[in-house]
Amino acid sequence: VPPLPPPPSSSSSSISSSLSPPPAAAAAAAAFPPVPVRSHHACVKTRSMEMALAFYSLLGYTPEAKFRAGPARAAWLTNASPPPAPDEKKGGGVVVVGGEDGEGPGAGAGAGGSRAVVPSRIEIIEVPPEILDESGERGAGATKRAADRLANPALLGLDHLCLDVTSSVSKSRLDARSESAIAEADEGGGEESESESESEKSPSPSPSPSSSLSSTTAHRYYGLSDWMDDLQSASDAKFGKTLRVALAPRVKRIGRSLIEMAYIYDADGALLELINCDVRLTKEGGVGGDGSGGGGAEEEEEES
């Protein structure tokens, strides 16, 4: 370690130098390797394990392990979605980290510019009824819910769980385009056969409204708002429940990135953020080709 220069004679400089770490501590910090830390899981408490499992199944989470945390039932839920395909244009691949618990020799970044995919995991802990005490004097017979952190911005501590649904939105977008293209081709074929049989009566038939509608749908941008509509439909069809939206989708500029974001509540009222990082803006500032998205991107607020 090179020797430190002598401290200046000014009082302000002497104060700043007194706050600097001693040479031995600076040398130890420089020699200490980066700490290999990653997020293993986020924990959410629930009043009903079955209700929580049903809700998070809509987001692709399935039970990985069930256990007890003292008197409480608990479970690890893991997102069962397959990893994204390698990006051939960038020459990178995908390395799935470890086994069920994400450990093993595959942990870390892959070779050749590939990126590691860490499984998304949520721990669910069911608060026992005797501790929850919804029917007793403290509970006053009311169903208990998580504190609404959007309505109470002064609450400190962990705020929300953020789920990146970009891959799911992109896949649904491709599926929607494929279905629309198939429908358009089928309608076009039917119109062509009808025009051939009636060519003598109508030499130049006009296109039908359904054909123009399918053509518009085939090129319509599919974003986070559409994905949430599909999620809402799945919840209603599967459980007869309506998802509670805390904040409708909007686009926010963070650094050099555009992120489409929204907030929903889980079954107990815990706050979940959904983000889509594949955002395209029109010249007018709307999202995609239909101009939706709340009037463009919100600028990131700089901290003073």
Image: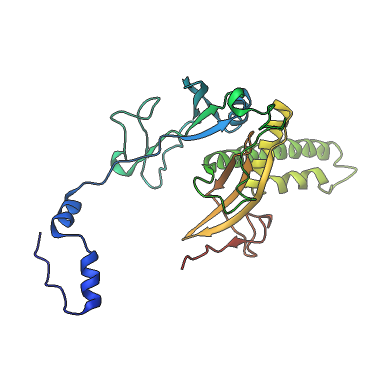
Residue 91 vs residue 15, the one in the foreground: 15
Residue lying furthest right: 201
Q: Residue at x 52, y 50 (%)?
A: 156
Residue 186 vs residue 37, the one in the foreground: 37
Residue 14 lies in quadrant: bottom left
| In this rendering, position of residue 135 left or right of residue 272 | right
Identify the colour scheme used.
rainbow
Instruction: Answer whether residue 15 is visible to the viewer in this image.
Output: yes
Q: Is residue 271 above or below residue 98?
A: below
Q: What quarter of the picture does the N terminus occupy?
A: bottom left
Residue lying furthest front: 137
| In this rendering, position of residue 180 left or right of residue 165 | right
Instruction: Answer whether residue 219 is visible to the viewer in this image.
Output: no
Residue 6 lies in quadrant: bottom left
Q: Residue at x 64, y 36 (%)?
A: 145
Q: Residue at x 71, y 37 (%)?
A: 183
* x then y, percent, for residue 78: 48, 29
Residue 287 lies in quadrant: bottom right
| In this rendering, position of residue 33 left or right of residue 107 | left
- Count numbered badges in the picture: 0
* x then y, percent, for residue 190: 78, 35
Q: Is residue 222 above or below residue 136?
A: below
Residue 36 vs residue 209, the one in the foreground: 36
* x then y, percent, for residue 206: 83, 49
* x then y, percent, for residue 203: 85, 47
